[in-house]
Image (cartoon, rainbow, N blue to C red):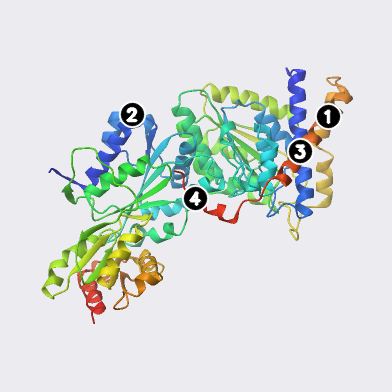
């Protein structure tokens, strides 16, 4: 099968969906050249650096029958438009009693690892997850990016796509034929028997990279990628934990108030699953500091293979 | 002035409906029948009336926390409005929104908004939608003077200007953002100067208590915006008779004398006087309209009272669309 990058997969998804539905509109400060060339400047609209206005304009477009895709770029810029995300986009369907649909996709780059420092590095999904009314996807491979993005554009609700900064150039197999990936379906990236590792975003790849190492130590890992956080596939995680009896949740977001904490809570508060636990679950997350600039400090603040391995070993002691 | 007697009567009926509706809401709020908080539109009726009577059904408006008047003037159903304010299942939003979040997408009422200036970016998007549709719909966004110090206001003025959006900014300058005076909060004589000077958008200052002035100015603005002339900014000078919102213990720090002066400038009485003195209508006609409107309000309250409350678990519905 052909291989394309994570970023190319997103572009393909957009191109195909924009051809499929003429109500799609793109808003961004940086214009995607392929879309602009094919669909023109009215529909592929360049915006000033004015996050509140274009995040909110997408809501007005959606409420008027359009299907906007907004590229916010860095997730840190999204905070400028928090009123529009939280008070407006998330609540508007509900507040108005479901009388109309608001199909919107907001794309944001998350993560750290590139010495972009604190105001260009963050993984804020738990903040958005705490606001009912937003769907959240977290694509980790080119295949998933394309399939989830297409589903997101067709969804009739505000969807936030959190895309990790380190994955843009990553290549992977993507079929030429049309496909979509439903929300709320996790994928077991590696089957195993001893420890369930639920990993998010870039950490999926970190976890998969140590499967062999752990095998050398006689530990069989089952690695789960939830792929979407809202809705979250609780079932796949629970079934896995019932099998392995051990859980490690890995994400680079700051550990306090994290999605990792939520996933752990879902597992331990389920009496049926709790009784299968052989040891206390562990979280491996970012330290509770803003992301520092200098490489040694940045690396220290983020989870890495050694930290994940240590947590896995702990669940077995 | 080239207004037909039919238009005059329509303006009167709409303005009176808003006044009577709001009077009843205030009474029913203080009697404990209505939960939450309500922001009374009494005193500002001429603005919503004079603006919305110039709009077509397919034109869109975005409103704010003080939004009952805009809904009524755009043609919303009084029964469903009252039921929503009463928190009933038959309300516009099935009781999920209440006074501050009434919407009726079928009549182009894209929702009232509880966040000051929060509706402005949404209006920008609705106006962009109108532009992309290549028809001649216009969008009107209503906001108060208080909203004009928010960043969202400035971002959307800029967006509307660079994209030449078919958007009418309807600023209701009632002199106060909660209890803070415009004079204190705004560094200009007129808020519309922000639109003209800052963003190259034509701005006009209008007596917001003169429904004819509101109607005629908006008529011109709508025609220009419809023709593709880009956004227009209308600043209506008006006053709210009541405090920022109805709530026990909410202090109204405005001078009593000032409130009295503005009550004497009542937009409804002023219009009524004009209609009678110019012999445009007979007193009896106005009295008949009043009787009909009172009946409609009474019916709306009966409808609300006879409607069921939502089931508690209805709270779980409508978080997402299917």
Question: Which label sits in the foreground, 3 or 2?
Answer: 3
User: Does the rendering let one see residue A299?
Assistant: no
Q: Residue at x 32, y 47 (%)?
A: A182
| Tag 4 and tag 1, C-beta contact below 8 Å | no
Query: Could you classify mark 2 by the number of other residues whose Cα lies within 10 Å: few (under 14), some (14-19), or many (20 or more)?
Result: few
Q: Are marks 1 and 2 on the same chain?
A: no
Q: Which residue is mark 3?
A: B299
- Tell me if mark 3 has few (under 14), some (14-19) or many (20+) residues whose alpha carbon lies within 10 angstroms of its own: some
Pointers 3 and 2 in contact (C-beta within 8 Å): no
Question: Label 4 belongs to which residue?
Answer: B319
Label 1 crowd bin: few (<14), some (14–19), many (20+), radius 10 Å: some
Q: Which mark is residue A40?
A: 2
Give the secondary structure at mark 4.
loop
Q: Residue at x 43, y 34 (%)?
A: A66
**Location of residue B129 in the rendering, given as x and y in whole percent from the top left corner:** 47, 32
Residue A304 vertical position relative to residue A182 in the rendered view, above or below: below
SS under mark 3: helix
Q: In which quadrant is the N terminus of chain B drawn?
A: top right
Coordinates of residue B309 in the picture (x, y in percent): 66, 51
Image position, residue A88 (x, y; %) = 51, 48
Q: Secondary structure at mark 1?
A: helix
Question: Which residue is at the front of the view, B240 or A94?
Answer: A94
């Amino acid at each position: 099968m052909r291989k394309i990058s994570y970023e190319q997969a997103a572009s393909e998804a957009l191109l195909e969906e924009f051809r499929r539905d003429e109500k799609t509109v793109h808003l961004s400060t940086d214009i995607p050249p392929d879309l602009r060339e094919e669909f023109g400047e009215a529909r592929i609209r360049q915006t000033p650096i004015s996050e509140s206005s274009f995040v909110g304009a997408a809501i007005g477009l959606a409420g008027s029958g359009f299907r906007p895709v907004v590229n916010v770029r860095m997730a840190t810029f999204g905070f400028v438009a928090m009123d529009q995300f939280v008070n407006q986009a998330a609540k508007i369907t509900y507040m108005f009693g479901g009388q109309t649909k608001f199909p919107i996709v907001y794309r944001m780059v998350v993560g750290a690892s590139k010495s972009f420092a604190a105001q260009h590095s963050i993984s804020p999904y738990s903040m958005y997850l705490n606001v009912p009314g937003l769907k959240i996807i977290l694509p980790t491979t080119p295949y998933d990016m394309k399939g989830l993005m297409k589903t997101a554009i067709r969804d009739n609700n505000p969807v936030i796509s959190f895309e990790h900064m380190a994955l843009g150039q990553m290549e992977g197999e993507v079929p030429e034929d049309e496909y979509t990936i439903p929300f709320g379906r996790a994928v077991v990236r590696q089957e195993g028997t001893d420890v369930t590792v639920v990993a998010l975003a870039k950490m999926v790849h970190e976890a998969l990279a140590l499967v062999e190492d752990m095998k050398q130590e006689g530990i069989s890992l089952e690695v789960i990628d939830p792929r979407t956080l809202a809705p979250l596939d609780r079932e796949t995680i629970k079934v896995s934990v019932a099998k392995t009896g051990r859980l490690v949740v890995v994400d680079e977001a700051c550990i306090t108030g994290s999605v990792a904490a939520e996933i752990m809570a879902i597992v331990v508060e389920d009496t049926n699953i709790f009784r299968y636990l052989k040891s206390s679950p562990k979280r491996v997350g970012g330290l509770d500091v803003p992301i520092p600039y200098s490489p040694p400090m940045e690396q220290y603040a983020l989870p890495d293979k050694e930290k994940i391995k240590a947590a896995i070993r702990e669940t077995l002691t | 002035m080239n207004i037909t007697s039919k238009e005059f009567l329509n303006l009167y009926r709409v303005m009176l409906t808003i006044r009577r509706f709001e009077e009843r809401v205030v009474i029913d709020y203080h009697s404990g029948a209505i939960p939450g908080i309500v922001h009374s539109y009494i005193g500002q009726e001429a603005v919503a009336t004079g603006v919305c009577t110039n709009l077509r059904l397919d034109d869109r408006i975005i409103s704010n926390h003080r939004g009952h008047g805009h809904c009524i003037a755009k043609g919303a159903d009084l029964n469903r409005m009252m039921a929503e304010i009463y928190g009933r299942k038959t309300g516009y939003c099935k009781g999920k929104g209440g006074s501050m979040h009434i919407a009726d997408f079928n009549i182009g009422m894209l929702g009232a908004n509880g966040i000051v200036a929060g509706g402005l970016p949404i209006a920008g998007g609705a106006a962009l939608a109108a532009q992309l549709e290549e028809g001649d719909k216009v969008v009107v966004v209503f906001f108060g003077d208080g909203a004009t110090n928010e960043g969202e206001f400035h971002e959307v003025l800029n967006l509307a200007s660079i994209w030449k959006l078919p958007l009418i900014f309807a600023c209701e300058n009632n002199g106060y953002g909660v209890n803070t005076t415009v004079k204190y909060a705004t560094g200009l004589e007129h808020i519309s100067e922000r639109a003209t000077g800052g963003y190259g958008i034509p701005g006009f200052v209008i007596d917001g208590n003169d429904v004819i002035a509101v109607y005629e100015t908006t008529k011109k603005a709508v025609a220009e915006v419809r023709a593709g002339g880009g956004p227009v900014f209308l600043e209506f000078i008006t006053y709210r008779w009541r405090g920022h919102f109805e709530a026990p213990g909410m202090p109204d720090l405005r001078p009593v004398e000032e409130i009295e002066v503005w009550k004497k400038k009542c937009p409804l009485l002023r219009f009524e006087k004009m209609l009678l003195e110019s012999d445009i209508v007979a007193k009896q006609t106005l009295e008949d309209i009043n009787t009909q409107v009172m009946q409609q309000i009474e019916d709306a309250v009966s409808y609300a009272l006879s409607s069921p409350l939502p089931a508690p678990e209805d709270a779980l519905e409508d978080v997402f669309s299917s």
